[in-house]
Amino acid sequence: MTRITFAEAARRALAAEMRRDPLVWALGEDLVQGGIFGQYKGLAEEFGTERIVSTPISEATIMGAGLGAALCGTRPVIEMRIADFTLCAMDELVSQIAKVRYMFGGQGRAALVVRMPQGMWRNSAAQHSQCLEAWLTHIPGLVVAAPGTPADAAGLLMTAIRSDDPVVLLEPKNLWTAEGEVPEDPSPIPFGVARFAARGDAATVVTWSAPVPVVEQGAAQSGIPCDVIDLRSLWPWDEAAVIASVRRSGRLLVVHEAVTVSGFGAEVVARVVEAIGPAGLRAVERMGAPRAPVPFSPPLENAMRITPGRVAEAIRRVAGA
Amino acid sequence: MSNETARRIAMLRDMARIRAFEREAVAAMRSGEAPGVVHPSIGQEGVAVGVCANLRRADRITSTHRGHGHAIAKGADARAMMLELHGRAGGSCGGKGGSMHIADFAVGMLGANGVVGAGIPIACGAAQAIRLTREDAIVACFFGDGAINRGPFLEGMNWAALYRLPVLFVCEDNGFAAFTRGSAVTAGGGPAVRAEACGVPATAVDGEDVLAVDAVAADLIARIRAGDGPQLLHARCYRWDGHTGTDAAAYRPAEEAAAARDRDAIRRLAAVLEAEAVAAAEIAAIEAAAAAEMAGHRAAAMAAPWPEPGAAFTDVQDAGAPA
């Protein structure tokens, strides 16, 4: 194991995949310069500007060209710079990439990755801070992964690149510089397999992406023995692990950075209720953002933020402590 | 018979097959035998055939909601297309796509598209992949005059010129963006001026003269194959029918459509062939064979089985497929 940042883990994983497979290439804004978070640093030097392509600020064509390139047998990694800019390429993602295989009766595969750094980061305000995973999990055809640790950043990126499905990789902006233990020689992490960050029978806490380290701290602070489940991928997601945990605890807390209303937490809760019935649940709570845009000023942004203290309180409430 | 005459006869056959296919498709749609809607390209056959006559099997095309002609001209399986229009098993897409999503990857037909202009970024990326894999092929990207008012057109022109991609952009200008005259919603000088502003050379051609389209496309495609970067072909033509097979096109004078029928690309080529001593009976036989082929495909489609309902849930995705 080696202790490196989220960005460095992802950078090394992409480099390894590009060494392994000459059909893997990346396109997006400022990639030759290393990308805005350093996650492409040095790759243009190693792989050349035909495989690390800096593009115009043309999101629709970045996304659509990635699809065309996939249909001709290459494996593009499409960089959206930040998830919010995907909104300028939604037709290409939702109505083209997600549907080509189906519409054409299986003739074409969109074997590609769309990287979307998402969430709050250093007071970036309303247009640069959104978490839109619920939009994407709603779209048939897409795989959605959301790593919350450096090791998962590497492993899930590798799986995404090798997948024949189109994969949206939501990379938390707030964690690019977070450090963690990463295997020297990382291997792919399968989609739909959650990671237990802590174990305990008093409550089940489900989370993903940027809140992962916050929830781990909050759970420790609460003093309550609970399962802390990092889903790691949202479609497919590890329903079996969550359902089994809630069967033991009877108490479920879902924590995400996205707006609570119509968030993916609602899907998690609904599936658990369908599976174990309302009588199996003694307490349920969702913790997310209020239905408001993300503000700029630090105290305003902090008012939206999920903190270990808030998580600890919620765990105590749910556990009935 | 000269090679040139033989080539022209092949173009006549392709145009006749496209027209016969679409006549059957419109009739099937109107009778209710084919579900949904079709967008016929009758009157525009010269553009598809004149361009695709200069493409090889390895070359790719992207197409539009009005794409039957592009597919047939590129060599797509017309029987499978007709079954697809009827929603039957054995259709090009197994009945999952219909008229607006015909694709035939075996001949490089990367798909019609239900979203105006959406093929442009896809064509750019296809060309980038072709370059990356050192494949000897180009991409022809068909779109209508309505597409030039969408952002992907501007993005794609800049993109293709920037990377000097092997793409022939074909703006098939039939005068109408759905129900609205293109000139009523398009400011400035049109597709050629816009393309040239991004560094994509543009050439205009009479799209109702297949030999003119063929000659210009041959020249532009030769330059693209030589590595000179993208080109735009602005082919003016006229959509004889309405936007869809049920649109009576009451928004335009009947004389205008009648005049377009008088400029029929098929009859114009037939006249050239007759002047080259091809017998009128041979031409009539080609057209009759095309009509018989497509009528046969329509009958086959009506006789073909429906897809199994379970097929609605296949080919969605591998990871997280519908339970």
Image (tube, rainbow, N blue to C red):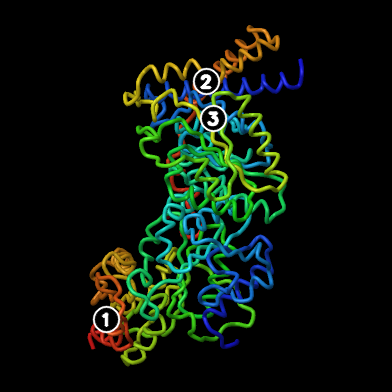
For the point 48% across and 30% down, which residue is it? B305
In the image, is A81 to the left or to the right of A108? left
Amino acid type for the residue under numbered disc 2:
Ala
Image quadrant where one finds the C terminus of chain A: bottom left
Q: Nearer the viewer, mark 2 or mark 3?
A: 3
For the point 53% across and 62% down, which residue is it? A78
Q: The disc numbered 3 marks a residue on which chain?
A: B
Q: What is the secondary structure assignment of the residue under circle 1?
A: helix
Horizontal and vertical percent position of residue A63: 50, 57
The residue singled out by tag 1 in the image is: A300
Q: Is residue B76 above or below residue A144?
A: above
Amino acid type for the residue under numbered disc 3:
Gly
The residue singled out by tag 2 in the image is: B20
Amino acid type for the residue under numbered disc 1:
Leu
Q: The disc numbered 2 marks a residue on which chain?
A: B
- Mark 1 surroundings within 10 Å by alpha-carbon count, few (fewer than 14), some (14 through 19), many (20 or more): few
Along the line of sight, the residue nearer the viewer: B183 or B173: B183
For the point 56% across and 67% down, which residue is it? A159
Along the line of sight, the residue nearer the viewer: B117 or A131: B117
Image quadrant where one finds the N terminus of chain A: bottom right
- Mark 2 surroundings within 10 Å by alpha-carbon count, few (fewer than 14), some (14 through 19), many (20 or more): many
The residue singled out by tag 3 in the image is: B69
Residue A40, labelled with which disc? none
Q: What is the secondary structure assignment of the residue under circle 3?
A: helix
Horizontal and vertical percent position of residue B55: 66, 36
